[in-house]
Image (cartoon, rainbow, N blue to C red):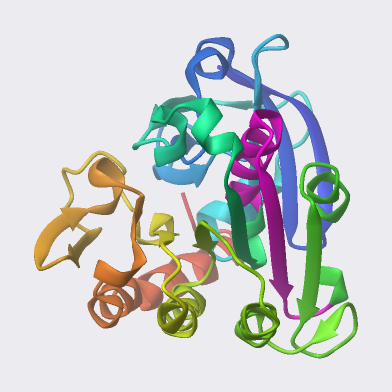
Amino acid sequence: MYKIIKRRELTPSIVLMDVYAPRMAKSAQPGQFLIVRVHDKGERIPLTICDYDREKGTITIVTQVVGASSRRICHMQEGDEFVDFAGPLGRASEFIFEDKEEVKGRRYLFIAGGLGTAPVYPQVKYLHDCGAKVDVIIGAKNKDMVILEREMSEVCDNLYICTDDGSYGKKGLVTDLLKELMDSGEVYDMAVAIGPMIMMKFVTLTLKPYNVPLIVSLNTLMVDGTGMCGACRVTVGNQTKFACVDGPEFDAYQVDFEEAMRRQGMYKNIEKEADHKCKIGLGN
């Protein structure tokens, strides 16, 4: 069993938890994910790793209520335990394997959309510790949906926030702010975008004319998380890849986003039905 050590509500529908998992905490790296199950008959849920503390033996996860299973996770309290907490899974971010002196000399830009702020945080934190310069754009629907602002501001050089409705930061989409930065003469060696699939698609289209290398994370496609179910198949550079075992991070300019979005939409009706059963007490 894996006990919840700390629980904090970031928004009414988004919950952060520190879970005691010392073996995972020792080996976790930015960019990786894990699989959780609430009980022995529960669904396997892939979640990205938001942070880890090797000394305390904890892994931080952030979960948003979008369906039946995520609702059950968010209802868990401090002292409750997950029956399964498996990982780390997937490939770590590429810069983890690069010489730290080379990484230190670069300037990075991260574009985080909504819950994508959670997997962006450990990457920015790692680069900050390496001495690299990092700017971050966080986009959300409104002020109440902006998460991890304080934590992110402590590990990046410049933090830009935009909201769809203008209730906080700059009004507009992350792509609007991204274009402003690039047109103003800002220069970056590498960019990373993590968030909704449609956001990553348009970040890719926006950044491509500026010839900035861009990585995207396809973590939202994953279902089984081990490559066995095939649900996360995606075409990258005209080759079939699996987001869970070959990724979840890929060269954005090689990703077939239209195919990825079609695949992501296949499970929406099933999840809505499961969520309805959960609300009326008929879910497992």
Residue drawn at point x = 61 percent, y = 59 percent: 110
Stretch in magenta = 118-142
- As for residue 121 lying within the magenta part, the answer is yes
State the image coordinates of residue 187 (x, y, percent, origin top left). Answer: 60, 66
> Residue placed at 57% from the left, 66% from the top?
66
Does residue 146 appear in the picture of this structure?
no
Of the 4 image quadrants, the one containing the N terminus is: top right
- Residue toward you, 135 or 48: 135
Left or right: 170, with 103 as reference point: right
33 up-or-down from 284: above or below? above
Does residue 52 lie above or below 173 as drawn? above
Residue in view at x 27 percent, y 80 percent: 262
Q: Position of residue 234 (x, y in %)?
A: 21, 64
Residue 209 picture quarter: bottom left
Q: Residue 4, relative to residue 243: is it above or below?
A: above
Residue 210 image point, x, y percent: 47, 78
Residue toward you, 149 or 15: 149
Give coordinates of residue 72: x percent, y percent.
61, 49
Say if residue 107 shows up in the picture. yes
Q: In front: 274, or 137?
A: 137
Is residue 57 on the magenta stretch? no
